[in-house]
Amino acid sequence: MAQVAEYLGLSVRTVQTYRTDGRMPPATMIGRTPTWTRAQIDQWMTSRPGQGARTDLH
């Protein structure tokens, strides 16, 4: 998660929260460690709402 956080410019805690909330793509688990490919993260970045976007409003 530290590498993903660094790549995205986010804190590790934010990545953990996104994963817990289901906002990250499903991870491949290696033991107890969640992992993602760079392609998964890049695809997720193109489809996620912009920074600061409210997703709870309809």
Image (cartoon, rainbow, N blue to C red):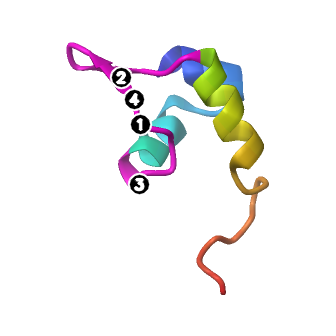
Residue farthest toward the bottom in the current orientation of the protein: 58
Given contact means CB atoms under 8 Å apart, are the residues at marks 1 and 4 in contact?
yes
Q: Quadrant of residue 56?
A: bottom right
Q: Position of residue 27 (x, y in %)?
A: 39, 29
Q: Identify which residue is drawn at 50% across, 30% down.
A: 12
**Closer to viewer: mark 2 or mark 3:** 2
Side (left or right) of 58 relative to 30: right
* Res 21 label: 3
- Residue identified by numbered label 4: 27
Mark 3, secondary structure of its residue: helix
- Tell me where residue 26 appears, x and y as whole percent: 41, 37
Q: Quadrant of residue 29?
A: top left
**Disc on res. 3:** none
Say which residue label 1 marks.
Answer: 26
Numbered disc 1: secondary structure: loop
Amino acid at circle 3: Asp
Report how far apart the C-alphas of labels 1 and 4 lie in the structure: 4 Å
Marks 2 and 3, how far apart at CA? 16 Å
Q: Is residue 38 above or below residue 53?
A: above
Element marked by disc 4: loop
Q: Amino acid at mark 2?
A: Thr
Q: Compared to 17, does 13 lie above or below?
A: above
Pointer 2 residue: 28
Q: Mark 2: give few (<14), some (14-19) or many (20+) Cα within 10 Å.
A: few
Disc number lying in front (1 or 3): 1
Task: Report the front residue among 16 and 48.
Answer: 48
